[in-house]
Image: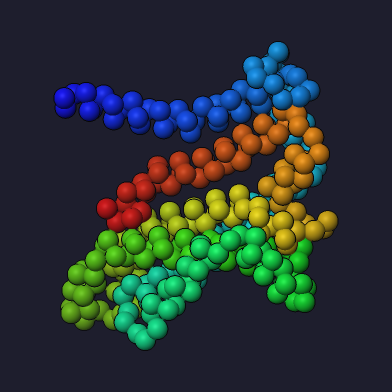
């Protein structure tokens, strides 16, 4: 009976993985198609669509914009998220629960409603179709994740070592820089990476903020798919998957996600 349950559990896990990864494999295969339309399996093989993507000025500019915005958003998410997470986890002050709920509120609001609200605020301020506007809009979505990840990491690390250091005469800033921050570094790396991935892939909020002067890669892909369907769409999807996967692998190889959460 136990062996049967084990086999069923393995079969279930394999089915879940197949459900997730088989569509991705199909996309990868289609990206090497020589056809002028989406078809599976392809009638012939070619790399021409990869060349088309690399020579497309709109996509390359969108890629550059997305990369710059994602890097800035990751840094700002860490800069704002680390102090907030530390205060929420280590300090006791009035209104702590309210502040935590306000920080996490964007996670439960519909993205369309959030995007419309941001557009109404940004238009009078002249932030539409600007780098600062896109960075601030993406930060609204990434900051809750960064705070939550860092807060979870701090919670799993515990405060015993920090209390011992302060008992031995270390000042609060010295304790944070020499004790807390080094132990928190895996969480710092993971939260920054996740913020970068979320920003790079963000499309709903970006659709409200971008304009003819400035666009991102996901928005450029969305507009392209709205007009035509050819294997270039699959190539762009592979590009997004590869970038996100590369960031995840860097985090896993450098610190590991288990360490990122203090486990």
Residue 133 visible within the image: no
Estimate the x, y position of residue 123 in percent, counting from the top left: 77, 72
- Quadrant where the N terminus sits is top left
In front: 43, or 113?
113
In the image, 188: left or right of 22? left
In the image, farthest residue toward the front: 1
In front: 229, or 215?
229
In front: 38, or 202?
38
Estimate the x, y position of residue 249 in percent, counting from the top left: 45, 41
In the image, farthest residue toward the right: 212
Estimate the x, y position of residue 210 in percent, counting from the top left: 75, 59
Tell me: residue 123, above or below residue 7: below
Residue at x-position 58% and y-position 61%: 110
Tell me: residue 228, above or below residue 144: above
Estimate the x, y position of residue 245 in percent, counting from the top left: 51, 40
In the image, 207: left or right of 7? right
Tell me: residue 160, above or below residue 17: below
In the image, farthest residue toward the bottom: 94
In the image, 173: left or right of 65? left
Residue at x-position 18% and y-position 74%: 164
Residue 15 lies in quadrant = top left
| Image mark count | 0
């Amino acid at each position: 009976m136990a062996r049967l349950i084990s086999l069923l559990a393995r079969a279930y896990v394999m089915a879940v993985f197949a459900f997730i990864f088989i569509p991705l494999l199909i996309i990868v295969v289609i990206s090497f198609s020589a056809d002028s339309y989406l078809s599976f399996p392809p009638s012939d093989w070619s790399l021409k669509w990869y060349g088309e993507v690399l020579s497309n000025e709109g996509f390359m500019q969108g890629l550059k914009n997305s990369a710059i915005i994602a890097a800035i958003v990751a840094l700002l998410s860490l800069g704002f998220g680390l102090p907030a997470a530390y205060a929420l986890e280590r300090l006791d002050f009035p209104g702590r629960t309210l502040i935590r709920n306000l920080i996490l509120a964007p996670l439960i609001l519909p993205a369309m409603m959030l995007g419309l609200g941001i557009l109404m605020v940004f238009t009078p301020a002249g932030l539409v179709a600007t780098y600062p506007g896109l960075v601030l809009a993406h930060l609204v979505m990434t900051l809750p994740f960064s705070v939550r990840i860092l807060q979870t990491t701090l919670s799993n690390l515990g405060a015993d070592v920090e209390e011992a250091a302060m008992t031995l005469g270390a000042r609060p800033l010295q304790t944070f820089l020499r004790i807390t921050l080094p132990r928190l570094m895996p969480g710092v790396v993971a939260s920054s990476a996740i913020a970068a991935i979320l920003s790079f892939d963000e499309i709903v909020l970006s659709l409200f903020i971008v304009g003819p002067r400035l666009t991102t890669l996901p928005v450029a892909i969305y507009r392209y798919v709205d007009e035509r369907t050819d294997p270039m769409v699959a190539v762009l999807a592979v590009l997004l998957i590869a970038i996100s996967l590369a960031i995840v692998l860097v985090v896993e190889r450098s610190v590991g996600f288990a360490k990122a959460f203090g486990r």
